[in-house]
Amino acid sequence: FATMPVFAILFYFGGVSLFSLFALEIFFVIVALMVGSISIFFSTIFKKTVMSMVVVYLIIGFLCLGTLASAAIANGMFWTYYETDPSPWINVFFYIGNPGVGFLSIIDSQIGSSIAKQLFNINYHYVDNSGVLPSIIINRFWIVNSIFNLIISAIFIWISSVFVKKPVKK
């Protein structure tokens, strides 16, 4: 919500539709909810705040950078073994929880380019040739990412509620 004045200035001068502004804000809130639910979960597991924060940073770091590295390794292994393009499901599997890929996807869909699709090897030719991926995954990957983040948030909040100990009566 702190960035709303900046978005309001962009909206005032044009170039940004109200739907684009709303979609981006909703995406940011969903990612913040996911990170917050993971943080709450690990704060219920560990007694010390520092340990909880370190584990949360490691998990979020893996979601942001580890999934990219894992996808690159999987694509390289697939290319070495089969000498053909890897299955698009490999990329979707690794990128579905990555908030950075979701962010680039929403920006990509708002400016009308296909840079993110080419960068992350989620291209149109998979749909045209094999019909493997539905067009929603390719055109609006940020929606799939947001749904996955909401599911992860719900799971972590539910598990956190199980691990929270009831207060001790005096």
Image: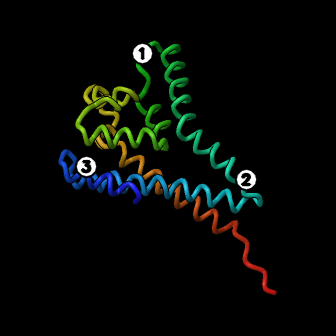
Crowding at dot 2, Cα within 10 Å, few <14 / some 14-19 / many 20+, comes out as few
Camera-side mark, 2 or 3: 3
Left-right relation of 36 to 9:
right
Task: Name the N-terminal-most of marks 2 and 3.
Answer: 3
Residue 169 x, y percent position in the rendering: 78, 85
Residue at the spot 31% in from the left edge and 43% down from the top edge: 140
Residue 9 x, y percent position in the rendering: 26, 52
Mark 2, residue position: 50
Give SS at disc 1: loop
Residue 73 x, y percent position in the rendering: 55, 23
Q: Nearer the viewer, residue 157 or 36?
A: 36
Left-right relation of 147 to 81:
left
Crowding at dot 3, Cα within 10 Å, few <14 / some 14-19 / many 20+, comes out as some
Task: Name the N-terminal-most of marks 1 and 3.
Answer: 3
Left-right relation of 61 to 26:
right
Q: CA distance from mark 1 to mark 3?
A: 44 Å
In the rendered image, the vertical position of residue 50 relative to residue 96, given as above or below: below
Q: CA distance from mark 2 to mark 3?
A: 39 Å
Q: Residue furthest bottom?
A: 170
- Res 84 label: 1
Residue at the spot 51% in from the left edge and 24% down from the top edge: 72
- Verify CB contact (< 8 Å) between mark 2 and mark 3: no
Q: Nearer the viewer, residue 85 or 11?
A: 11
Crowding at dot 1, Cα within 10 Å, few <14 / some 14-19 / many 20+, comes out as few
Mark 3, residue position: 10
Q: Residue furthest left?
A: 14
In the rendered image, the vertical position of residue 21 relative to residue 104, given as above or below: below
Q: Quadrant of residue 117?
A: top left
Give SS at disc 3: helix
Camera-side mark, 1 or 2: 2
